[in-house]
Amino acid sequence: MLVHAIPSNVGYEFAAEVRAGLAREGQKELPSKYLYDDVGSALFEVISHLPEYGLTRADERLLRRHADEIVDRVPGPVAVAELGSGSGRKTRWLLEAFCRRQRTSYYPVEISHSALVMCERELSDIDAISIVGFEREYLEGLLEVAAYRKPGQHLCVLFLGSTIGNFDRPAGVNFLAEVRCILQPGDSLLLGTDLEKSSSQLLRAYDDELGVTAAFNLNLLARVNRELDADFELSEFEHQARINPDARSVEMHLRSKRRQIVTIPSAEVVVEFQEGETIWTESSHKYSSEEIFETARQAGFRCEVQWIDEEWTFAENLLVGA
Ligand code: AVI
């Protein structure tokens, strides 16, 4: 087993994106990728255990149930690249099945250093696995993985947990098309997508009773305070989950409880908030099972098989080059 993290160079963009997102006219916005510092990644791990949030468990159930079937459809020898590995817990089922067949290289690509460390710790006991972690943005990391693979190895890319839902639909298609461009014949993409469900179920999932999702969201302001010396008063903002029926998404916002001014010295910006004004921090788009075939087609893939969890409607989709 080899464990090797290639350090990140993403940090310097944070200040620029915070300035751009908060100084703009109209809806203030912060990119959801910044929710995942060490504290945010740990809070997301807790969210995945909450009774109200069944998404991660559905993903894991499908991978556990269908691991052998998925592996049978992916020609070996294989290098597995995972975009956004998180703790790696749900990936274990798949990696064990790949490694039962033959020695397998696993390349988690993560912007969160702590998640990468957690993932390597979680999976390093699997027999016949070698792990090389890439602390990178997804596409940048995938390009490096593609350059790293050995001759004859097929690449199987994992994009699980419905992270695709955090892109708006056109951006999701573009992202998949970019992944497609990096792949070669015989490569594949396993895509996890959360499916549509009732508004009440979604609001419970994204505004849980314990307040873990609220803490996950508010931590973004705490991060701006920690890393950019800002003076956000956390108690003066509140978490909000909202349904956007047109986008078929659930949104997270941070709502200012009063009129206030926040200074962010390291981003060289002073921001005024009106009472009730929000910062939009994340969207989670929900898919219909049929639409995934069309989304795959638009990105240059063919959805070969789809497995659906009925307990918490969620689909695992195996995509190959069209
Ligand atoms: C990582 N991503 C798919 C999660 C989601 O459901 O959109 C992040 C999350 N946000 C709030 N709860 C979980």
Image (spheres, rainbow, N blue to C red):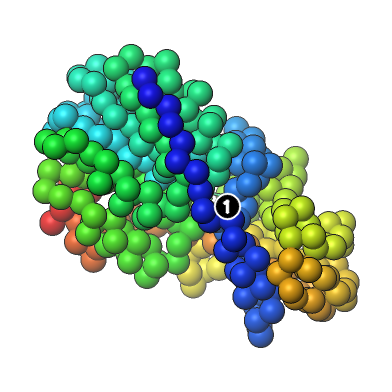
Residue 126 or 194: which is nearer the viewer?
Answer: 126
Question: On the rendered structure, is 18 left or right of 143?
Answer: right
Residue 92 to residue 213: above or below? above
Q: Is residue 250 visible?
A: no
Residue 39 is drawn in which quadrant?
top right
Q: Is mark 1 within 8 Å of ligand 1?
A: no
The type of residue carrying mark 1 is: Leu
Q: Residue furthest bottom?
A: 25
**Dot 1 corresponds to which residue?**
202
Find residue 111 and report its horizontal and vertical position in percent.
51, 48
Q: Is residue 155 visible?
A: yes
> Residue at image x 43%, y 23%?
123
Find residue 283 and report its horizontal and vertical position in percent.
54, 61
> Residue at image x 37%, y 28%?
131
For mark 1, does the 10 Å Cα neighbourhood hold few (<14), some (14 to 19), or many (20 or more) residues?
many
Residue 67 is drawn in which quadrant?
top left
> Residue at image x 36%, y 55%?
139
> Which quarter shows the C terminus?
bottom left
Residue 145 to residue 248: above or below? above
Query: Dot 1 lies on which element?
Result: helix
Residue 61 to residue 291: above or below? above
> Residue at image x 29%, y 17%?
128
